Image: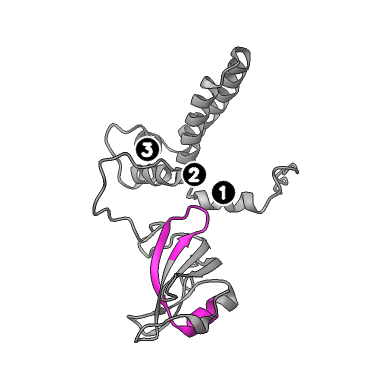
Amino acid sequence: MTGIEQLKFDAQELIPCVVQDYYTKKVLTVAYMNRESLEISMKEGRTCFWSRSRQELWRKGETSGNVQKIVSITADCDCDALTVEVVKSGPACHTGEESCFFNTIYQSEEKSPFSMDALYDLIAGRKTCPVEGSYTTYLFQKGLDKILKKVGEESTEVIIGAMNDAARGKNEEAIFEIADLAYHLLVLMVHQGITLADVLDELAGRHVVDKKVKQETLK
């Protein structure tokens, strides 16, 4: 276990912190801490930084409500930089983006590894920046009723596909239909402002494997 006394702060008594989403592992932002803000972060269990521009302590989410609850803080091999894994409530960036890192400078021509997080961001982009001829943009333009209709249709297709596969001894149709359902669920999530982290956080708080979880009837 590394203690604060072993960390190497710079000439301004600061140490850089790479803030990372605990669930998706996406880098959210890079900020700085001094000894006091680090101690506050560890004591309160939420990120507190040192603002170099304002020269004051900065508790993330103090005004916006976009709090970052700390899961772990790790120092690098030289003890002069930190990685802070967090569960975030709301966007990490002041622009409203989920991460501060959204300006692409270079993209390899090689196919990037697929991730649900990247697909979610791509779908969200079709909402904020509509593309003519895009099916995703079309769904957003049609609105919630259309999106819910598609989720219902795709759910039925999953059931039919699974039954057909069971008769054939294969899983090809079910896989295809599950992928369609997953896509439309992501569209619904983006439309409603629900993030992947929101769903993962909900699952983390449940015992879904061995215990049936049923939502209580709202009154």
**In the rendered structure, which segment of residues is drawn in magenta?**
19-41
- Which amino acid type corresponds to the residue marked 2 in the rendered image? Met
The alpha-carbon separation of the residues under discs 3 and 1 comes to: 24 Å
According to the image, label 3 marks what residue?
141
The alpha-carbon separation of the residues under discs 2 and 1 comes to: 10 Å
Position of residue 188 relative to residue 54, above or below, is above
Q: Which image quarter holds the N terminus?
A: bottom right
- Which amino acid type corresponds to the residue marked 3 in the rendered image? Gln
According to the image, label 2 marks what residue?
189
Which label number is shown at residue 199?
A: 1
Q: Secondary structure at mark 1?
A: helix
Q: Report x, y in % for residue 82.
A: 45, 71
- Residue at the spot 32% in from the left edge and 80% down from the top edge: 53
Q: Which of disc 1 and disc 3 is earlier in sequence?
A: 3
Q: Which of disc 1 and disc 2 is earlier in sequence?
A: 2
- Which amino acid type corresponds to the residue marked 1 in the rendered image? Val
Position of residue 62 relative to residue 117, above or below, is below
User: Is 105 included in the stretch rendered in magenta?
Assistant: no
Which label number is shown at residue 74?
A: none
User: Is 31 included in the stretch rendered in magenta?
Assistant: yes
Dots 2, 1 in contact, CB < 8 A: yes
